[in-house]
Image (cartoon, rainbow, N blue to C red):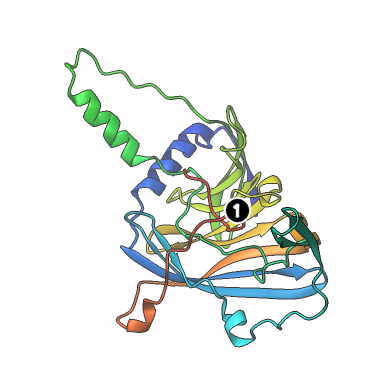
Amino acid sequence: MVAAATSDTPDAYAVWLKTRSAITAAQYPGRIDYTIAVTGLDGSQPAADHYRASCDSGDGAIRLFPISDEQLAAPGPVPHGVNMFFVIELSGGRGSGTATDAIPMGHPAPGSDLLGEPLLSPTYMFGLGYNLAATHAQAAASSQLRVIATVSAQSPNYQVTMIDMPAIDGVVTYHLKLVPLRRPKENRLRELWVGTRDYLPRKAIISGNFTIAPLVDVPWVVDFSIVDGAPYIARESAERTLYLAHRRVVHDAVIAFENIREPGDSPYDEPLVEPEQDDTALIEPRD
């Protein structure tokens, strides 16, 4: 069911501000454990990687077991064939000896991860929440000065309009269109669906995802779930084919967050590390 926006529909920008406030006020456990499932067609072959991960809602630290369940169950084959090298021989003259150096030719072998190590949290909200740390710092700085008058100014990042009021999974939503007014690469939201009762997100369309090409250059659909009054990412789906390095082509890429839970008491919940971030890791830009 889709209801058209009418004169009784709330102002779109007011809905946007209530959404940002609702997301900022959401409460999360101190630590969240979960599984990240990365799936898609690697060429024409179905592929799936499942990683155990954990995030700290206080400092935002993400920890990950960097080897997927599939890689643990079936380690990749040892490569065979001929390795080709370009050999350089250097001579210092008669009696001084020679030295050689071998430089491998061709591209390095691609990694076994479908899209890269996913250093991701299901609580990431694409800039929808307010940056409370910056707000508190600004308030602390202003408190040192004599207050003559209080001025409230807003510099919106988006032009916001109402499209319609469809139901998503039985929940009536406000469907918003978002046009960035500045920095379109950073302000990536293009459409947003939020519940009419709680103003929490149910779905979004973003212009690009993560920080590396080509993922940052294609649109993605983001589906959310609400758990104990707080929004979590359920899945992120690429809307176009991804042409990656090493001539790898991935169709229908989906990153899903599964089995979201508070940590248990088992010591086996802890063998996670904070991996180094390289140029192939999946990382969200800072809000």
Quadrant of the rendered image containing residue 58:
bottom left
**Residue placed farthest to the front in the image?**
95
**Does the rendering let one see residue 243?**
no
Quadrant of the rendered image containing residue 153:
top left
Pick whichever, 146 or 109, lies toward us: 109
Left or right of 225: which side holds 88?
right
Task: Give the quarter of the figure containing the N terminus.
Answer: bottom right
**Does the rendering let one see residue 254?**
yes
Pick whichever, 92 or 150, lies toward us: 92
Image coordinates for residue 40, horizontal then vertical, percent: 71, 68
Pick whichever, 44 or 205, lies toward us: 44
Image coordinates for residue 106, horizontal then vertical, percent: 80, 61
What amino acid does circle 1 point to? Asp
Give the residue displayed 55% in from the left and 63% down from the top. Answer: 118
Residue at label 1?
279
Left or right of 74: which side holds 227?
left
